[in-house]
Image: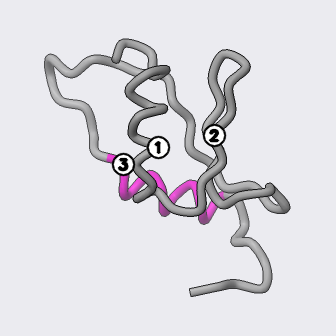
Amino acid sequence: MRRDHPRPPHRSVRNLNRRVPRPSAGDRHSYEILSPYPDLPAPIIATAWDKRLQVQSAADPRLSEFLSTYLQGA
């Protein structure tokens, strides 16, 4: 569903928070941040160490590869 205006940040963060799995004992900790922001050039932009990946969907296999490469503790 396409919106003509972005959701207020507090509502978007709350929605993301419900979808992110909670770490269990023994899980490694990582330092990724997910947040919506209006007027970005792509719906999903991953950045790390001067590298940037812009994708249209979380299903894009390049996103998993990027996260596996650059995620703290991965």
Q: Main secondary structure of the magenta part?
A: helix
The x, y position of residue 32, in whole percent, is 51, 30
Which numbered disc flags the more N-terminal residue, 1 or 2? 2
Report the quarter where the N terminus lies.
bottom right
Residue identifier under label 3: 20
The x, y position of residue 58, in whole percent, is 46, 56
Q: Quadrant of residue 27?
A: top left
Kindly report the distance in space between the C-alpha atoms of the residues bearing marks 3 and 2.
21 Å
- Element at label 3: loop
- Residue type of the residue flagged with mark 2: Leu
The x, y position of residue 8, in whole percent, is 72, 67
- Residue type of the residue flagged with mark 3: Val
Residue identifier under label 2: 53
Foreground: 56 or 26? 56
Task: Report the magenta residues as a range.
Answer: 10-20
- Element at label 2: strand
Circle count: 3
Give the label on residue 49, or none: none
The x, y position of residue 19, in whole percent, is 36, 57
Which numbered disc flags the more N-terminal residue, 3 or 2? 3
Residue 42 covered by magenta stretch: no
- Residue type of the residue flagged with mark 1: Arg
Residue for point 44% across, 15% down: 72
As displayed, is residue 47 above or below residue 8? above
Badge 3: residue crowd in 10 Å (few <14, some 14–19, many ≥20): few
As displayed, is residue 57 above or below residue 17? below
Q: Quadrant of residue 71?
A: top left
